[in-house]
Amino acid sequence: MKREICVPEMPASQMALTIITDEQLEAFANAVITKYQQCIAHRGYLVLSMVGEKHLYRKANVMRILNGGRK
C-alpha cells in the first residue's frame, strides 16, 4: 500500500507530492526511534537493559523523565 502525503497549507509552487510505501514509512519511524533512544541513553537520561531482543528501562527512570527530571 502506498500513502500520499502533502501539506495543503503550502502554496502550490512549494507543494510536493511524495509517495512512499508502508515499509518505507515503518523503516523511517524505526530509524527515528532508534536515534532518539541512543540520544537519551548517551545523555544519561535512560539506561537501557537488554533481555533477549527486548529493550527495557527502569520504571523509576521513565517516571523521572516524564516528571521533568534528568538525573
Image (cartoon, grey):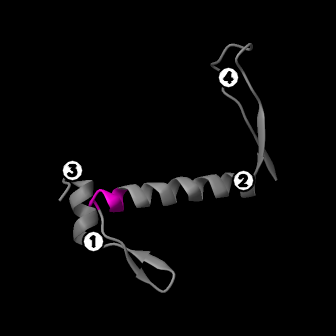
**Label 4: few (<14), some (14–19) or many (≥20) C-alpha neighbours in 10 Å:** few
Q: Which mark is residue 8?
A: 4
Foreground pick, 63 / 23:
23
In the rendered image of this protein, does residue 71 appear above or below residue 47? above
Q: Name the residue under label 3.
A: 68
Q: What element carries label 3?
A: loop
Q: Position of residue 1 (x, y in %)?
A: 82, 53
Q: Magenta residues, as a range?
A: 40-45
In the rendered image of this protein, does residue 20 appear above or below residue 5? below
Q: What element carries label 1?
A: helix
- Amino acid under disc 3: Gly
- Classify residue 44 by image quadrant: bottom left
Give the residue drawn at x 72%, y 53%.
24
Marked residue nearer the N-terminal end (2 or 4)? 4
Give the residue drawn at x 39%, y 55%.
39
Q: Mark 2 points at which residue?
A: 24
Marked residue nearer the N-terminal end (3 or 1)? 1
- Classify residue 11 by image quadrant: top right
Marked residue nearer the N-terminal end (2 or 3)? 2
Foreground pick, 57 / 2:
57
In the rendered image of this protein, does residue 68 appear above or below residue 12? below
The answer to whether the residues at label 3 and label 1 have Cβ atoms under 8 Å apart is: no
Q: How many labels does the image show?
A: 4
Q: Mark 1 points at which residue?
A: 59
Foreground pick, 50 / 8:
50
Q: Which is in the foreground here, disc 2 or disc 4?
A: 2
Q: What element carries label 2?
A: helix
- Amino acid under disc 4: Pro
Q: In this view, does 42 lie to the left or right of 5?
A: left
Q: Is mark 4 on a helix, strand or loop?
A: loop
